[in-house]
Image (tube, rainbow, N blue to C red):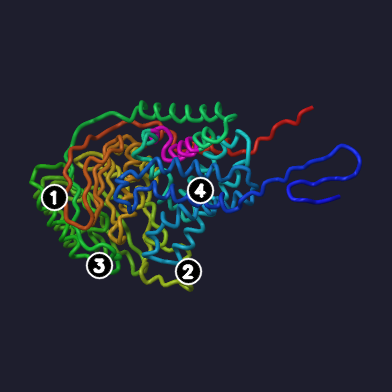
Amino acid sequence: MVRSAGTIHDPTPGPAICIAPRPLEDPISPTLISLAAGLLLAFSLPAGLPWTGDGGLWPLGVAGAAALFLALAGAGWRRRLALGLVAGLGLYVPGLWWMRDFSLPGWVVATLLEAAILAVAVAIVPPDGRRRLVAFPAALVLAEAVRGAWPFGGVPLSGIDLGQVAGPFGPSARLGGRLLLVALVGLAGAGLASLATRRRDVVPALAALSAVAAVCVAGALAPDGTPSGAMRVAAVQGGGVRGLRAVDRAPAPVVNAHLRSAAAIAPGSVDLVLLPEDVIDVEGPVAGSAEDAAVAEAARRLGATVVAGVVEDVEDNRFRNAAVAWDAAGARVDRYDKVHRVPFGEYVPARSLVDRVADLSVIPRDAIPGRGPGVLDTPAGRMGVLISFEVFFADRARAAVRAGGEVLLVPTNASSYRDDQVPAQEVAAARLRAVETGRWVVQSAPTGYSAVVDPHGRVVSRSGLGGAEVLEAEVVRRTGRTLFVRTGPAPVVALAVLGALPFRRRKET
């Protein structure tokens, strides 16, 4: 047998055999495509880029999904796992960049963990066949579902959904919440990629894109509740230096700055005033404190309900984070204690173990979790409440609306972050919660962003960062439930599980 370049010739008698060489797969190209896919998904998020606005650059998210779909084609499961990890790093290295302000090792660990979740999910996508069109969006949904619940209750910041709130997929959130938006991104990306690269897949690709369009139309037409009366609200922002942690701030200047800002509101001009999370920080109960008296006086002067974020020291190592309401007579009428705490922000899981390997001086206390739905009964109406981090969790908004919340209030505090990555994502999350529930959302932050969002997810008013501002707006109390409030994410997750199952074809007989 004689070997030569290009073919193998067998000189023995018989018919000549000519075997063309199998082209070598370039191992770099799929890796680069996967990295580009992750970066496109990251750049679709409303974070840190002046041209992204409050809703992100949604087409980049679809382009990122299409690129990842292409990169996975024909790859074995180990290769798909590696490509998914590369895409995850492209997404979460910049997407979770805000974590480096608090802990560089924590940022590295969190980034690797989040990327690994995406990698495991996309590894289940088959390397070929038409079923990829269904399995790929299903994998993205399952990855986001896991991120939203695990570990430590989930950290859904930098989720693919946050970049889609301003796009055509946004209204669909009232049907299936944020996970439905993720499914639409994956299905649209897979459909466009198939349409562009394989002629034989034109019919399935067009079917996938038609399904995306149908869901978008259904979302835009779906009922989102009923108006029950208008009210005037004011979101107060006291301003101040950004990038300071709670342990580095003196409490008195914060509350004084916000009361000065509230003094600009004309008496009798609003029904409800919202002050941010942690604007009041007291040792012991707020009842009977000087801060209690000061807010009560402000409520009486304004002739309005005042809702303020209150942190109460319970012991040397524990505290409560609450939203407290005062009526126009200055009496405290209701309170809600935050349920969903920030891991490694408001509490440290396994503190005794972590304390041996990390400096926990910046997190000296653990928050005591509250219970039940976030609602406040006030003279202005029954208000739903999502305190800060809770705005990223649709289950907290659903619970508030199912308990009768007519408007969603978001007292938050993002002043610890130096840049606008987290504040911008908070506004995007508030917009999603508004669409999912069919409710107006009023958000107040000490150094921004404060915002007022209508039930369609449109930002009616938004503050800047750092300065003192008061946003006044007319909002509408609303009743009724969207489909998502009724069903939650379960139907989307169930469909994703079915889409990801490895169905096998029957062997031909």
Identify residue for label 2. Answer: 354
Check disc 4 and report the residue beneath it: 146
Foreground mark, 1 or 4? 4
Of pointers 1 and 3, the one earlier in the residue sequence:
3
| Residue occupied by mark 3 | 249
- The mark that comes first in sequence, 4 or 2, is 4
Q: What range of the chain is rendered magenta?
A: 172-189
Locate residue 133, reporting x and y percent: 56, 35
Q: Position of residue 393 (x, y in %)?
A: 39, 46
Q: Is residue 268 left or right of residue 122?
A: left
* Of callouts 2 and 3, the N-terminal one: 3
Which kind of residue does numbered mark 3 sit on?
Arg
Extreme residue toward the right, this view: 13
Inter-mark Cα distance, 2 to 3: 25 Å
Is there any visible trace of residue 113 in the rendered image? yes
Report helix, strand or loop for mark 2.
helix
Q: Which residue does the image show at 15% across and 61% down from the upper left?
A: 256
Q: Regarding mark 4 in the picture, which secondary structure is present there? A: helix
Q: Amino acid at mark 2?
A: Val
Answer whether residue 184 is magenta in the image: yes
Vertical relation: 107 (above or below) 143:
below
Mark 2 or mark 1: name the one nearer the start of the chain.
Answer: 1
Q: Main secondary structure of the magenta part?
A: helix
Secondary structure of residue under mark 1:
helix
The residue at the point 51 percent across, 46 percent down is: 143
- Label at residue 299: 1
